[in-house]
Amino acid sequence: MLSHILCSYSLDNGLGLYPPMGWNTWCTLGKCGRDFCNETEVLSVAQELIDNGMSSLGYDYVNLDDCWADSRDANGNILADPDRFPSGMKSLIDKIHGMGLKFGLYTCAGTYTCSSGGRDHKIPGSYGHYEQDAKTYASWGVDFVKVDWCYTTGLDPQTQYSQFSHALNVSGRAIFFEMCEWGVNDPWKWGAPLANQWRTTGDHHDDWNNTLGVINKQAGLSSFSGIGAWNYLDFIYTGGQGCTDDPNKHCPGQSDIEYMSEFSFWAFLNSGLIVATDIRIMTPIMKEVLYNQEIIAINKDPLRKQGDRVYLDGDKQVWSRPLADGSVAVILFNSGESEQSITADFSLWGWAHTKAMVRDLWLHHNIGEYSNQYTSIIPPHGVNFVKLHKLP
């Protein structure tokens, strides 16, 4: 019922019927924070999305972060960096569309962008140019816009994002709208009429303590997410961010178990699955995680009901969400530093005196039949992500 309510009051652009999936430039060619994207890289990754089969699984957005713009012309029109994008943005976007993919850009609600993409000068934000920039993006064929929140002293986020939302709505093109004010002003409480997704926390980093903080922040937010209006947990870093000294490898900040936990929660919580690592260097853990169709199916479940935490005891957590076929997706999560035995009592989601078949979504097989509760031994920072089918 909630999802239908949110649909009625969410941004009316017909987009975001399911959380988006794709790739972002942010941590591909180096460590996060200095995004050195360029035309060759973007086209290469776009082609790789097709060649490696990721696009067929739903990863169809190619998004540029704070790395592409350079300045404004005499008329105030935003210009792409001519050294990084010599063919121009319209030409690049046409090529991406020709591959059957969608294209996204970054801007900022303030006077400048946040990081300047590794350049020695500040890059103009969109403040004072919301409608002008929206029309430019529409004329280029942009499908997705992320709007950050730097250089906004004295500005009210709800007011500015409302103005940007209006600018997109009158641009002449339906454009997916992401608000990125880092969850400071509880955007989940007011974002649904304005945007298709909003960040619930500060930046997510390729670091376990940060990942754990992002996960814990989501408890209690399920009622604010629904069709066309999603809580968003920021990028996923499966396999590791880029390396400053070597562009041909990953420099992972988390373990394989932690990457599996990260992906599990992002999918379970109906967050967008936007990968910010170099998918052209496909490692075994990247293939195991990013290609997990059973977990992607949870993210794309037709009920589109975000999960929530239903049990917390120290380092032991249980999260659950209902699915369209009447089954329940459950994550048993060990946030601590030692192995834990965690039990999920079926009464936590209203199943009293019930027998269920339990399927492990990482092992891809049924574990067996369980009555009234299910117990699993979970390694530190790990999850047991299962699907429970009620038996007669």
Image: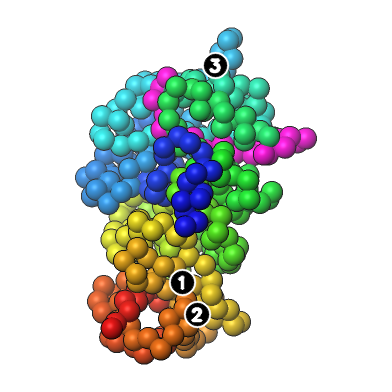
What's the magenta region?
139-158
Q: Is residue 136 left or right of residue 153?
A: left
In the rendered structure, which amino acid carries the disc numbered 3?
Asn
Q: Earlier in the sequence, mark 3 or mark 2?
A: 3
- Provide the secondary structure element on which disc 3 rests: loop
Q: How is the image coloured?
A: rainbow
Label 1 with label 2: CB-CB less than 8 Å: yes
Which quadrant of the structure image shows residue 363?
bottom left
Residue with the mark numbered 1 = 320
- Badge 1 element: strand
Instruction: Give the Cα distance between marks 3 and 1.
Output: 47 Å
Give the residue type at disc 1.
Ser
Other residues around mark 1 within 10 Å, as few (<14) / some (14–19) / many (≥20): many
**Percent position of residue 187, x then y:** 63, 48
The secondary element bearing badge 2 is classed as helix
| Residue ID for mark 3 | 77
Report x, y in % for residue 277: 41, 50
Q: Position of residue 10 (x, y in %)?
A: 52, 43
Report the quarter where the C terminus lies: bottom left
As drawn, the label of residue 345 is: none
Residue 348's disc number: 2
- State whether residue 123 is above or below residue 201: above
- Residue type indicated by callout 2: Leu
Residue 216 shown left or right of residue 289 in the figure: right
- Labels in figure, total: 3
Q: Is residue 381 visible?
A: no
Of pointers 3 and 1, the one earlier in the residue sequence = 3
